[in-house]
Amino acid sequence: MYLIRDVFKCKPGKAKELAERFKRVLPLVERDDRFRNNRVMVDAVATYWTVVIESEVESLGDFERHMTEFGSRPEVTEVMAGYMDLVDGGHREIFRIV
């Protein structure tokens, strides 16, 4: 089992909009990609305008399939269109759950 954490540093004032988009997309990831325990987090005591999405996935193969297919799904592209205009940068962390 793996924990996938994507950390986004948003442009000033844009974290709320990005978090709302992720909240709309995560049920699709749960349904189509077998991700579970999905959640969206925003900074309370962290770098300003930070949004984190966190999910668990059974295998890295499932994650790789997700990465290959996710962006081409019409319902995803509709919700996430232009999301990079909200983001300054970020990074991904992948942990193996022991």
Image: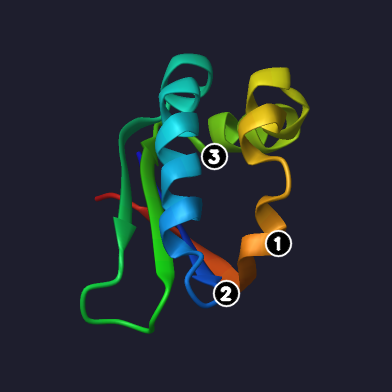
Whichever of labels 1 and 2 marks the residue nearer the N terminus, that label is: 2
Q: Amino acid at mark 2?
A: Lys
Residue at 52 percent across and 23 percent down: it is: 33
- The quadrant in which residue 27 appears is top left
Q: Amino acid at mark 3?
A: Leu
Depth order, front residue of 13/89: 13
Q: Is residue 75 left or right of residue 31?
A: right
User: 21 above or below 69?
Assistant: below
Residue that extends furthest to the front in the rendered view of this protein: 13
Under circle 3, the secondary element is helix
Gap in Å between the C-alphas at discs 2 and 3?
30 Å
Depth order, front residue of 17/90: 17
Under circle 2, the secondary element is loop
Q: Which residue is mark 2?
A: 11
Q: Is residue 16 left or right of residue 70?
A: left
Q: Which residue is mark 1?
A: 85
Residue at 49 percent across and 27 percent down: it is: 29
Percent coordinates x, y for residue 97 in the rendering: 29, 49
Q: Which residue is mark 3?
A: 60
Under circle 1, the secondary element is helix
